[in-house]
Image: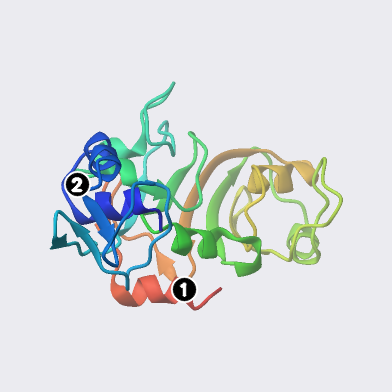
């Protein structure tokens, strides 16, 4: 972890105050003054601010029900940021592990642990994600088998990994994928001549969405570890 991030997570100082403390030599790592804010430190190092040992706060892991017409960004743009729904400190340190489009609703995971989110979203993790999909046309016979074999998306060389399609009605289905390609669900249905009209993520890994629109909760320790074991 960068030194400035460690100090920020261990104190109530602003980013500019952290930078100033480091530059004037108020931070020591293992009894050595460090003035480079980008220096890498570890939690087992002894890091002090003016002689006071710093301890990092615990990482935060949050499940949120993303509303439509919001964006998975730390700042408002054309649409408002989902972070407007959080009423916690140091929101700027948080990021989203696996974003959704502005018009897509459902489950997102938010954290300040970059290593955890990388392990969750890395292609090698193949973490399953389940979406409720509503379509413009009736599902054709054989689409489930096609998705199970993998389809070639426009602009891609390789087939998608096997995906599971469970038909709910003639125009609604649950799709579980283990990848996170750009607009993957929409592109998969486009490849079989259909169009997604609404998309809602219901589940990531073994955890199902269980809070109302715009609401959030912290993940339990067991839930956090359940994702870690999938890597």
Near-viewer residue (18 or 227)? 18
Q: Is residue 221 above or below residue 162?
A: below
| Residue 166 occupies quadrant | bottom right
Image disc number at residue 140: none
Residue at image x 68%, y 38%?
195
Mark 1 crowdedness (10 Å alpha carbons): few <14, some 14-19, many ≥20: some
Tell me the quarter of the image containing the C terminus.
bottom right
Is 202 on the left or on the right of 218, as rendered? Answer: right
Q: Position of residue 222 (x, y in %)?
A: 34, 77
Picture colour scheme: rainbow
Q: Is residue 224 above or below residue 196?
A: below
Residue at image x 64%, y 48%?
185
Residue at image x 45%, y 64%?
116
The residue to which callout 2 is attached is 88
Name the residue at the right extreme.
157
The residue to which callout 1 is attached is 228
Q: Position of residue 106 (x, y in %)?
A: 42, 49
Tell me the quarter of the image containing the N terminus.
bottom left
Q: Position of residue 216 (x, y in %)?
A: 27, 52
Mark 2 crowdedness (10 Å alpha carbons): few <14, some 14-19, many ≥20: few
| Residue 160 occupies quadrant | bottom right
């Amino acid at each position: 972890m960068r030194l400035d991030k460690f100090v920020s997570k261990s104190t109530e100082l602003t980013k500019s105050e952290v930078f100033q403390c480091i530059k004037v030599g108020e931070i020591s790592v293992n009894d050595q003054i460090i003035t480079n804010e980008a220096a890498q430190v570890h939690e087992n190092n002894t890091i002090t601010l003016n002689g006071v040992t710093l301890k990092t706060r615990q990482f935060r892991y949050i499940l949120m029900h993303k509303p439509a017409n919001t964006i998975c960004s730390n700042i408002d743009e054309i649409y408002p940021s989902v972070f407007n729904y959080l009423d916690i400190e140091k929101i700027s340190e948080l990021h989203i592990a696996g974003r959704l489009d502005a018009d897509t609703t459902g489950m997102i995971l938010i954290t300040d642990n970059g290593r955890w989110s990388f392990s969750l979203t890395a292609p090698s993790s193949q973490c399953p994600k389940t979406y409720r999909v509503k379509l413009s046309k009736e599902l054709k016979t054989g689409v489930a088998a096609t998705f199970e074999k993998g389809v070639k998306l426009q602009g891609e060389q390789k087939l998608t990994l096997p995906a599971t399609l469970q038909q709910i009605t003639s125009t609604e289905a649950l799709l579980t994928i283990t990848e996170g390609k750009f607009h993957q669900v929409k592109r998969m249905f486009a490849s079989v001549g259909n169009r997604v009209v609404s998309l809602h993520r219901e589940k990531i890994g073994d955890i199902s969405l269980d809070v109302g629109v715009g609401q959030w909760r912290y993940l339990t320790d067991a839930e956090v570890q359940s994702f870690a074991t999938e890597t």
